[in-house]
Image: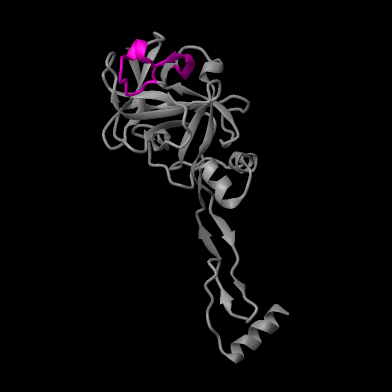
């Protein structure tokens, strides 16, 4: 028997085209996935259908740190975040499942900075600023967020089908966005590098602006027990389809064993 990790990398349009399955079938499969530490995910804001996003663009106000925005396109690698344990907490392994109520950090996959918040003012809404902060995944306690599942209780296993809030641990504010808080030429100037994207900030209340869901990503799955098998010629085969050659005496033994 062989233990192995299944890693599922899902982008809807690619799978639908190459494997001739519908978007609905892909979404159904994604929703079955339990979420483990180490998974890299695309997180969708529910009321706007934009994705949590970052990039090498700094805020022109507030902290001046790397900006975090909402991006409409669902195929941008800058919208991928790796789920890690909280700051200064013991390292989580790939078979540690996330539970509702857990404390996590989200590390931006391409810039290695963590989703962060602090008492600076966001550009438009006046809410608390959200930025990307740190160096190669190292940051501080302001990178910590609590996963609050909306229809489940604390301690339940977290999976992709669940809607949730992200509560900033130090300030108790909730990650949010709204389509009215968008970067455009009027408020960001001509040649604005983030024109058309949404402000991401943190607010005190839980409402539709603060509702999120896992959309897709690279999911580590729980190890499975798989039995080795024999092919039609009586050769011993492992779970990867690799078969050993055996002589006639061994073949007879194998056939008798299977019968």
Q: Position of residue 92 (x, y in %)?
A: 42, 42
Rendering quarter of residue 115: top left
Q: Is residue 122 visible?
A: no
Q: Which residue: 51% across, 29% down?
A: 44
Q: Is residue 180 magenta?
A: yes
Residue under the point 32% across and 20% down: 192
| Residue 192 located within the stretch drawn in magenta | yes
Question: Where does the image place residue 139, in percent across and percent down from the top left?
Answer: 29, 30
The C terminus lies in which quarter of the figure?
bottom right
- Which corner quadrant holds the N terminus? bottom right
| 152 w.r.t. 237: above or below | above
Q: Nearer the viewer, residue 26 or 127?
A: 26
Residue that sits furthest to the top in the current view: 126
Residue 178 seen in render? yes
**Which residue occupies 52% across, 45% down?**
14
User: Could you say where residue 75 lies in the image, as x and y percent from the top left?
Assistant: 46, 37
Pick out the residue farthest to the right. 259
In the image, the segment drawn in magenta is: 170-195
Q: Looking at the image, which residue is at 55% across and 69% down?
A: 241
- Total numbered circles: 0
Here the colouring is one colour
Q: Residue furthest front?
A: 190
User: In the rendered view, does 71 fall on the left or right side of 1?
Assistant: left
Q: Is residue 123 above or below residue 167?
A: above
Across and down, in percent, residue 198 comes to: 43, 20
Could you say which is closer to the camera, residue 13 or residue 246? 13
């Amino acid at each position: 028997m062989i233990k192995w990790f299944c890693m599922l990398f899902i982008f809807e349009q690619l799978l639908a085209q190459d494997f001739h399955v519908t978007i609905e079938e892909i979404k159904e499969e994604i929703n079955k996935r339990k979420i483990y530490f180490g998974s890299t995910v695309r997180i969708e804001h529910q009321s706007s259908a934009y994705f949590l996003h970052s990039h090498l663009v700094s805020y022109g106000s507030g902290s001046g740190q790397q900006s975090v925005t909402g991006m409409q396109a669902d195929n941008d690698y800058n919208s991928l975040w790796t789920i890690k344990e909280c700051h200064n907490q013991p390292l989580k392994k790939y078979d540690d499942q996330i539970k509702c109520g857990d404390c996590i950090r989200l590390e931006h996959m391409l810039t290695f900075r963590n989703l962060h918040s602090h008492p600076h003012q966001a550009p438009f809404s006046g809410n608390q600023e959200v930025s990307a902060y740190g160096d190669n995944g190292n940051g501080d306690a302001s990178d910590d967020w609590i996963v609050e599942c909306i229809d489940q209780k604390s301690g339940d296993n977290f999976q992709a089908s669940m809607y949730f809030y992200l509560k900033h641990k130090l300030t108790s504010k909730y990650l949010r966005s709204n389509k009215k808080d968008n970067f455009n030429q009027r408020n960001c100037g001509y040649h604005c590098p983030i024109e058309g994207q949404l402000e991401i900030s943190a607010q005190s209340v839980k409402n539709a602006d603060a509702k999120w869901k896992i959309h897709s990503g690279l999911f580590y799955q729980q190890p499975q027990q798989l039995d080795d098998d024999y092919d039609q010629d009586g050769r011993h085969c492992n779970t990867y389809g690799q078969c050993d050659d055996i002589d006639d005496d061994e073949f007879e033994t194998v056939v008798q064993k299977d019968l």
